[in-house]
Structures are given as C-alpha cells and as structure tokens.
Amino acid sequence: MRSVLALAALACAARMVFSSSAQAQLAVTLKAPWDGRLMPPGQQCRLFGGIGATPPLQVSGIPAGTAWIVVEFNDRDFAPLSSRGGHGIIAFPAKGTSMALPAVSGLTASLPRSAVVVAAAQTSGEYASAGYPPPCSGGRGHRYVADVKALDRANKVLATARAEVGRNRSGTVGFQVVNADCNP
C-alpha cells in the first residue's frame, strides 16, 4: 500500500506546474542513435510500421537530495496529450550527479533497472499503452517533448530540463535538446 501511495504522490509531483527561478541547472542530452535532428528509423509507433522506444538520455547536473529522475513524454501538437505526461510518465531512481537513462520500449509496463511507470499514457483505443507509446502522428510532424524533473524524497521538484522535438523534411520527428523550464 505504501508503494502505491508513494507512486501516486510521485505522479502528482511530476504533473504539477512550477517556477524554475530557484532550481538547479539540470541538463539532458540525447544518446545514440538519436541525433537531435531526425528520429531514428523505426522509432515511431507500430500503427505506422515502427517498434519505438524512448530515446536514451544522459542527465547531468542532478542536484543533491534528488531521489527520482522523472520523465514526462508529451505531444505538443495534440492537445489531449500535450502536457502532464500525455505519452506517459516514467521515473528512474536517482544515482549521483549524472546518470544515463536507458531507452524504454514502447507499449509496455515492463521497464529496465528499477524504473517505474508513474502514469500510463493518456491514450486510448488502438493507441492505448500501459506505459509509453512512441510517436504516432502518422507523419504529421508533431512535436514531442520529454520533460525531465529531479524530485526529492518529498516529491518536491528540485530542477527541470526538456528534450524538445524537431522535424525533418518528410514530416517524421526527432528529439532536439533544449534545457529550459518545463512549462509550455
């Protein structure tokens, strides 16, 4: 029961809107095969021929006292999934001031290395997912973001960063890193 309550509190903290004025300098960078410009082949959803996963991320500048690194995935161009983890919220136990977050397979709640699904995607029907659904705009060029937050044991947001999506000429998407406040 405690773990359920802890996850519920974590979800609330991850979804809250906050000011970054007193926050530490958290930074996030993409790892291969993501290049910040183009989405690697096959990283879209199954409905459009892919078997996508989250991009692996390197997070640095993790402030002292961080218990969790929480990543909210959003589709900025589809209002129902544009904020508060529309494409799911995944948390990783924090370790040190820098850590690598592994890619997480789409459409599953089975996660690597103590990671947990804090909130499943807010998708439904053929787009439904128990965790993270990969980009699934069908080539419409939607902008997807990964909002990264460092939370302490009381679920207070200590720092934020954002991996922002860019588009290529064919309308598919890729992640481009922008360290900024997570408020839209």
Image: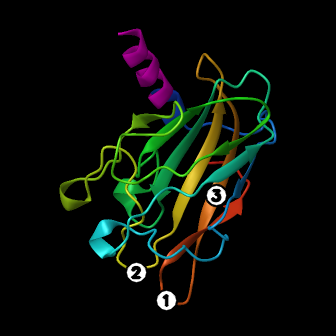
Q: Position of residue 8 (x, y in %)?
A: 41, 23
Q: Amino acid at mark 1?
A: Ser
Q: CA distance from mark 2 to mark 1?
A: 7 Å
List the residue tagged with mark 2: 139
Q: Amino acid at mark 3?
A: Ala
Q: Is residue 3 magenta?
A: yes
The local crowd at label 2, few if under 14, some if 14 to 19, many if 20 or more residues have their Cα within 10 Å, is some
Magenta segment boundaries in residue numbering: 1-11
List the residue tagged with mark 3: 163
**Which residue is more in the foreground, 177 or 180?**
177
Where disc 1 sits, the SS reads loop
- Relative placement, left or right, of 138 versus 37 is left
Residue at the outermost left position: 125
* The C terminus - image quarter: bottom right
List the residue tagged with mark 1: 170
Quick check: marks 2 and 1 in contact, CB under 8 Å? yes
